[in-house]
Image: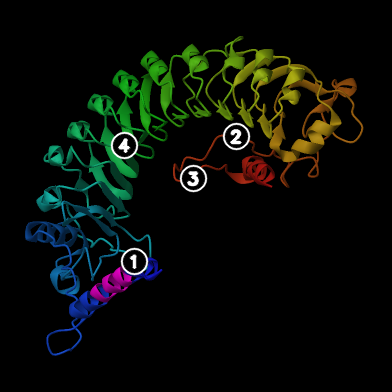
Amino acid sequence: MGRARGGRLLPVLAALFVALLLISGCAAEGEDEEGSPVVAAEEPEAPMEDKQKAALYAAIGSFVGKAWNGSGLFPDPCGQTPIQGVSCDLFNGVWYPTVVSIGPVLDNSLQCAPDARFSPQLFDLRRLKSLTFYACFPAANPTTIPAASWDKLSGTLETLEFRSNPGLSGAIPASLGRLASLRSLVLVDNNLTGAVPSELGGLAKLRRLVLSGNGLSGPVPATLGGLKGLLKMDLSNNRLDGRIPPELAGLESLTLLDLRNNSLTGGLPDFVLAMPALQDLLLSSNPLLGGTLMQRGWEKMASLATLDLSNVGLAGAIPESMAAMPRLRFLALDHNRLSGTVPAKLAALPSIGAMYLNGNNLTGALEFSARFYQRMGSRFASWDNPGLCTAETAGGAPTGVAVCKDAQEPPRVGVRDGMDAGGGKPEASSSFPASSSSFGLSGHKVAGLWCLVMVMVL
C-alpha cells in the first residue's frame, strides 16, 4: 500500500522539480546578480547603404531643387524619417529604395523645381522598381528623356510613368527597350515626338503600353505584335499614320486597343474579329482610315463592350451580325459614309446603353420600338441621315428624324426635339475626347457613357 502511494507521488514531485527549474531560469534571465531587472537588448534597425542614400538624395535633389536638404530633413529615408513618394524594401537585411514618385499628387508630395533635370545618380538606385513623374517639366523647361544608362535598371524596373509634362520633348529613347523587367510603360500628355521605337516590341513582360497625348509620328511598329502578354495598348492622340499592322493579331490577351485621333489608313483590319479578349476597340477620328464594316464574324467578339468607329471614313452597310455581340454597351458609327438600312436587330443588343448612327447616308425606316427610344434617350442619335425616317410610334421617336409617312416633308424639329436656340443641329460626335487623361465623352455624350456606367453599377 505504501509502495503504491510512493509510486503515485514520484510523477508529482518530478513535475514540481521541473517547474522550479523553469521559474529559476526565468528569474535568472530577468534579473542580474543583484536582483535588478535586465532589459533585453533591442535588435538593431536594418541598415541602408551609404551609396544608396547618396544616390537617392542626389536624384531627388536634381528634380526638386538644390535647396532641398535631403540628408538633413530625412536622415533615415527608409526608416524613421520617410520621404513622401519614396518606398523601400529589404534585400538580404539591407534597405533599398524601390519606388520614387515625384509630382503634385498629395499636399506633401515632392514637387519639381522650375529647373528640374535628370541626374545620373538616378540610375544608381539599383533596386528601383517604379519611377513616376507627374507635372514635373513645364514648357519653359524643355527636357529630354536620357538615352543612356537605362540598362542599369533592366533587372528591376517594372513601372515607368511620365505624365503631363509639356516640357518633356524629343524622342522616346530606343534604350527603353532594354528594360527587360518592365511591365508598365506610360508616357502620357507630354511633348514627345518622332517614331515609336520598334525596340519596345522586345519588352516581353510588358502588360501596359500607353503613349497617348504626344506628337509621335510614323507607323505603328509591327514589332509591337511581339508583346504577347500585353493587356492595354493606347497610342491615341498622336500623329501616327500608315496601316494598322496585321502583326497585332498576335496580341491574344489584349483588352484595350486605343488608336483614336491619328491619321491611320488601310481600313478596319479583319483580324480584330479574332481577338477574343478585346473589350474596348477605339479607332475614332482617323478620317483617312476608310474601308467597310466586315459583314460577318462580329459574333466572335464576345467580350467587346465599347466599339468607337466614329469619323473614320467608313462606307457600305451596317451588318446585321453586329447585333450578335452580347456585351456591347457602347456603339459609335457616326460621322461616316455608311448607307443602306439600319438593322432592326441592333435594338435587341442585350447590353447596349448608347448608340450613335448620326451623320451618315442611312436610308429607309428605323424599326426600333418606342420603348427603345424611351430607354436610350439622348444616348441614341440618328439625325443627319437625309433618307432615314422612323415608323410612327406612340410614346417615343428619335430626335431629328421624320416620321416615314411624312418623309416627303422636312422634319419639324424644334428646341424640344434637339435643335439649339439658333436652329442648328445638336452635336453628337460620339468620339472620346482628345485628352487621353479621361475616358468619358464631351458635351451631352457624358450622359451616354456615364449614365450607362451608373445604371450598370446600380
Numbered disc in front, either 3 or 1:
1
Could you give the CA–CA distance between mark 3 and mark 1, rounded to whole angstroms? 78 Å
Q: Within 10 Å of the Cα at label 2, are there few (<14), some (14-19), or many (20+) other Cα atoms?
A: many
Q: Give amino acid for label 1.
A: Pro
Q: Mark 1 or mark 4, which has the lower sequence index? A: 1
Task: Name the residue: 32% across, 64% down.
Answer: 109
Front residue of 36 and 197: 36
Q: Mark 2 or mark 3, which has the lower sequence index? A: 2
Q: Position of residue 208 (x, y in %)?
A: 37, 35
Q: Within 10 Å of the Cα at label 3, are there few (<14), some (14-19), or many (20+) other Cα atoms?
A: few
Task: Name the residue: 25% across, 65% down.
Answer: 83
Quadrant placement of the N terminus: bottom left
Q: Give amino acid for label 3.
A: Ser
Q: Is residue 450 magenta?
A: no
Task: State yes or no: discs 1 and 2 in contact (Cβ < 8 Å).
Answer: no
Quarter holding residue 210: top left
Which residue is tagged 1? 11
Could you give the CA–CA distance between mark 1 and mark 2, rounded to whole angstroms? 88 Å
Q: Is residue 41 above or below residue 220?
A: below
Residue 438 got which mark? 3
Quarter holding residue 356: top right
Q: Mark 1 or mark 2, which has the lower sequence index? A: 1
Q: Point out the stretch of residues depicted in magenta.
A: 13-21
Q: Give amino acid for label 2.
A: Ser
Residue 443 got which mark? none
Numbered disc in front, either 4 or 3:
4
